[in-house]
């Protein structure tokens, strides 16, 4: 098939929808791939809702996501854990997915601190689920994205390259004593959490589901926690609280330090993700990718220049002793 996949192309290939009147509309978000709500009516007049996710191969070709086939597989595996939406149809030739529609409220950054219990629970379920078929390493992803910027002459925020040696030191420290790798999402901005319930209203959610497996892969579980903290712009005490809720009695100061350094590394790496998106794709014209890159780097710079950075590096690197990690 040549040219972009249309919604009608995708829906025509779904047996579940054959012969049923359908209406569709684009859903908010979707900075890379295209996501639509699809409403179909059955013979009894009952309306059912679904989510159609059309994957853009150019995204993975630019280093901004895993290959479409891998995302299709990982989305199915995440559904097996009970955290991801059920996969109702896979159209690998397009590529596209039809998913169950998750009723509830999409969280925003301001909601995350009040929902760390259900968010941590959802992460534990994903991390305990079936292993993905690929691995993800945030240090390698940063190097890949920086190389893309250099090859294409893409602008990065002022001061980025000058701080590379410090970022590399953080990466080496995290690599010294890594926890066992588990299936991770690796892109846990608030909008990828759906609060359970008919409308998600009425206070903190009792449960959370996780969507969008564009960057998923087996990884250090503390990266998912650090990424959550980065996207919600957590303070150190909030990072400690998230770590404690996730690890329970296994929580250690070394694990808190890992989460805080992964927060920093998330911001430093996704700075480049937005720089590449701005320079090569701009999938959503209404979104300011360049400003987002600048904001990510502002947050990373704050933590790179914080007086406690050395102590965090020492804690995760086990300077003088091996740090206590969960079994």
Image: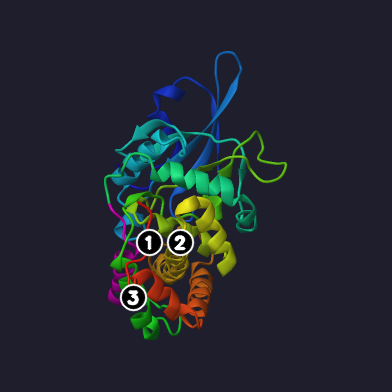
| Quarter of the rendering containing residue 162 | bottom left
Q: Residue at x 34, y 35 (%)?
A: 91
Label 1 belongs to which residue?
Answer: 324
- Location of the N terminus by quadrant is top left
**Between 81 and 19, the one nearer to me in the picture:** 81
**Who comes first in sequence, dot 2 or dot 1?**
2
Report x, y in % for residue 106. 60, 46
The correct choice, above or below, for 155 with respect to 101 in the image is: below
Label 2 belongs to which residue?
Answer: 252
Report x, y in % for residue 227. 47, 60
| Quarter of the rendering containing residue 257 | bottom left
Name the secondary structure under disc 1: loop
Give the spatial CA distance, label 3 vs label 1.
12 Å
Is residue 139 within the magenta segment? yes
Report x, y in % for residue 294. 51, 75
Q: How would you rate the neighbour count of disc 3 (Cα within 10 Å): few for under 14, some for 14-19, many for 20 or more? A: few
**Who comes first in sequence, dot 3 or dot 2?**
2
Span colored in magenta: 135-151
Secondary structure, magenta segment, majority class: helix
Task: Point out which mark residue 261 bears.
Answer: none
Q: Residue at x 49, y 79 (%)?
A: 308
| Quarter of the rendering containing residue 235 | bottom right
Is 302 left, or right, of 265 in this rendering? right
Give the spatial CA distance, label 2 vs label 1.
7 Å
Q: How would you rate the neighbour count of disc 2 (Cα within 10 Å): few for under 14, some for 14-19, many for 20 or more? A: some
Name the secondary structure under disc 3: loop
Is residue 54 within the magenta segment? no
Give the spatial CA distance, label 3 vs label 2.
15 Å
């Amino acid at each position: 098939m040549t040219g972009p996949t249309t919604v009608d192309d995708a829906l025509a290939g779904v047996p579940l929808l054959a012969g049923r009147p359908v209406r569709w509309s684009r859903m908010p978000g979707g900075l890379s791939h295209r996501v639509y709500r699809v409403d179909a009516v059955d013979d009894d007049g009952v309306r059912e809702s679904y989510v159609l996710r059309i994957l853009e191969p150019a995204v993975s070709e630019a280093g901004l996501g895993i290959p479409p086939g891998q995302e299709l597989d990982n989305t199915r595996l995440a559904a097996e854990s009970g955290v991801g939406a059920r996969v109702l149809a896979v159209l690998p030739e397009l590529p596209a997915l039809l998913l169950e529609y998750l009723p509830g409220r999409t969280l925003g950054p301001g909601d995350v601190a009040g929902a760390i219990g259900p968010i941590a629970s959802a992460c534990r379920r994903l991390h305990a689920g079936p292993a993905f078929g690929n691995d993800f390493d945030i240090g390698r992803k940063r190097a890949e994205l920086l190389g893309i910027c250099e090859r294409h002459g893409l602008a990065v925020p002022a001061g980025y390259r000058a701080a590379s040696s410090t970022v590399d030191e953080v990466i080496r420290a995290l690599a010294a004593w890594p926890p066992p790798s588990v299936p991770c999402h690796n892109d846990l901005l608030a909008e990828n959490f759906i609060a359970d319930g008919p409308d998600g209203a009425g206070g903190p959610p009792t449960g959370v589901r996780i969507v969008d497996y564009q960057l998923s892969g087996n990884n250090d579980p503390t990266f998912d926690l650090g990424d959550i903290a980065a996207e919600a712009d957590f303070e150190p005490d909030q990072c400690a609280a998230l770590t404690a809720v996730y690890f329970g009695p296994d929580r250690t100061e070394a694990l808190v330090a890992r989460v805080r350094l992964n927060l920093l590394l998330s911001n430093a790496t996704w700075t480049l993700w937005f720089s590449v998106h701005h320079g090569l794709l701009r999938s959503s014209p209404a979104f300011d990718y360049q400003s987002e890159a600048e904001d990510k780097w502002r947050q990373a710079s704050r933590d790179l220049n914080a007086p406690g950075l050395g102590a965090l590096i020492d804690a995760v690197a086990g300077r003088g002793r091996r740090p206590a990690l969960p079994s």
